[in-house]
Image (cartoon, rainbow, N blue to C red):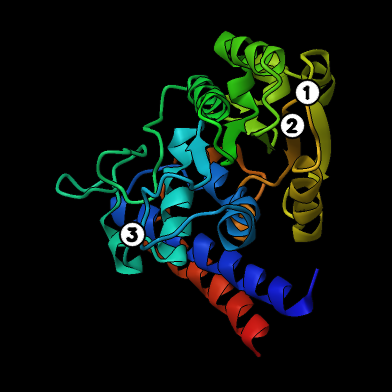
């Protein structure tokens, strides 16, 4: 990866993480842990991978992204704001009663959101439908969907996966945020989906397993996915829940807890320092 591009992507990651902390702190609620873990994936999607235009968020040939783990909306909103779909300042209105940035993405109000999500397990089905529609219509757009690893306990995920494989949807890319933690503990303790990669292989997917917080590996996975024909791709991205904020990393308690004023200051200071080091 070009060094200038990598630097820009790293700065995007910091901006996305700052947006997540800003939003959840001002909302006094939300899901920072699983939002912070997908910053690299979203940064690469919006900076490099996807054909999208913030000036024309509904253009017909745009690539689609479905955030199946809809509670990670703070990350998606921060990525969209960083990409220019709406003002960064609006992130402070997260979950306010008069805000368009609610706790789960709403395609009717938020520029750049392609599907309203929040009921876990259902987003991948919407993504599969979009990918099939692209094939039927003779279009070239690709469809991406981000799932949580705990979400894999939903049976609808595997119905959708089976259908995607049966229809040879090579324009579909499923990304599993494998941060190993869900609201009640580790995914092994709750209902283990392991081995995740082997399950998707059994369902007829091309599978790529990566460190999802490593931009070089993220870039390589998305490039490889575009070369695969005749089957969908699943990128199993091993990530760190709470990545980028030291006291949140690998702590299940930050699945659905917002930082208080003191924690907000510490988190933003860490992210400001990371930004300064990149800019310096």
User: Is 2 left, or right, of 144 in this rendering?
Assistant: right
| Residue 267 sits above or below residue 111 on the image | below
Marks 1 and 3, the one that precedes in the sequence: 3
Along the line of sight, which residue is nearer the eye, 172 or 263? 172
Which mark's residue is nearer the viewer, 1 or 3?
1
Residue 42 % position (x, y): 58, 52
| Residue 26 sits above or below residue 8 on the image | above
User: Is 181 left, or right, of 265 in this rendering?
Assistant: right
Would you name the residue on which mark 3 appears?
91
- Residue beneath the point at 45% across and 34% down: 70
Q: Specify the quadrant that holds the N terminus.
A: bottom right
Residue 258 % position (x, y): 41, 48
- Residue beneath the point at 63% across and 20% down: 152
User: Is 260 left, or right, of 51 in this rendering?
Assistant: left
Checking the image for residue 205, the label placed there is: 1
Q: Specify the quadrant that holds the C terminus.
A: bottom right
Along the line of sight, which residue is nearer the eye, 122 or 190? 122
- In which quadrant of the rendered view does residue 167 lie? top right
CB of mark 2 within 8 Å of CB of mark 3? Answer: no
Marks 2 and 3, the one that precedes in the sequence: 3
Mark 2 neighbour density, 10 Å: few (under 14) some (14–19) many (20 or more)? many
Checking the image for residue 233, the label placed there is: 2
Residue 264 % position (x, y): 43, 63
CB of mark 1 within 8 Å of CB of mark 2? Answer: yes
Q: Check disc 3 and report its element: helix, strand or loop.
A: helix
């Amino acid at each position: 990866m070009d060094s200038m591009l990598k630097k820009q992507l790293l700065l995007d990651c910091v901006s996305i993480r700052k947006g997540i902390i800003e939003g959840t702190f001002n909302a006094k609620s939300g899901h920072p842990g699983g939002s912070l873990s997908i910053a690299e994936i979203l940064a690469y999607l919006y900076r490099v991978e996807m054909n999208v235009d913030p000036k024309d968020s509904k253009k017909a040939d745009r690539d689609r992204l479905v955030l199946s783990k809809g509670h990670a909306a703070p990350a998606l909103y921060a990525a969209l704001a960083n990409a220019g779909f709406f003002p960064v300042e609006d992130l402070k209105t997260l979950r306010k009663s008069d805000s368009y940035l609610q706790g789960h993405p709403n395609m009717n109000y938020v520029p750049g959101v392609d599907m309203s999500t929040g009921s876990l397990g259902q987003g991948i089905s919407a993504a599969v439908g979009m990918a099939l529609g692209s094939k039927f219509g003779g279009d070239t757009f690709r469809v991406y969907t981000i799932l949580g690893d705990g979400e894999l306990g939903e049976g609808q995920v595997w119905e959708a996966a089976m259908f995607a494989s049966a229809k040879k949807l090579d324009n579909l890319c499923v990304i599993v945020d494998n941060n190993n933690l869900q609201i009640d503990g580790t995914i092994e303790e709750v209902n283990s989906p392991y081995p995740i990669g082997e399950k998707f292989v059994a369902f007829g997917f091309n599978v790529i397993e990566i460190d999802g917080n490593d931009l070089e590996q993220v870039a390589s996975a998305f490039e490889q996915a575009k070369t695969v024909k005749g089957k969908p791709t699943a990128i199993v991205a091993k990530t760190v829940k709470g990545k980028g904020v030291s006291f949140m990393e690998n702590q299940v308690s930050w699945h659905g807890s917002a930082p208080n004023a003191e924690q907000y200051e510490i988190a933003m200071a860490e992210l400001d320092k990371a930004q300064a080091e990149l800019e310096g």
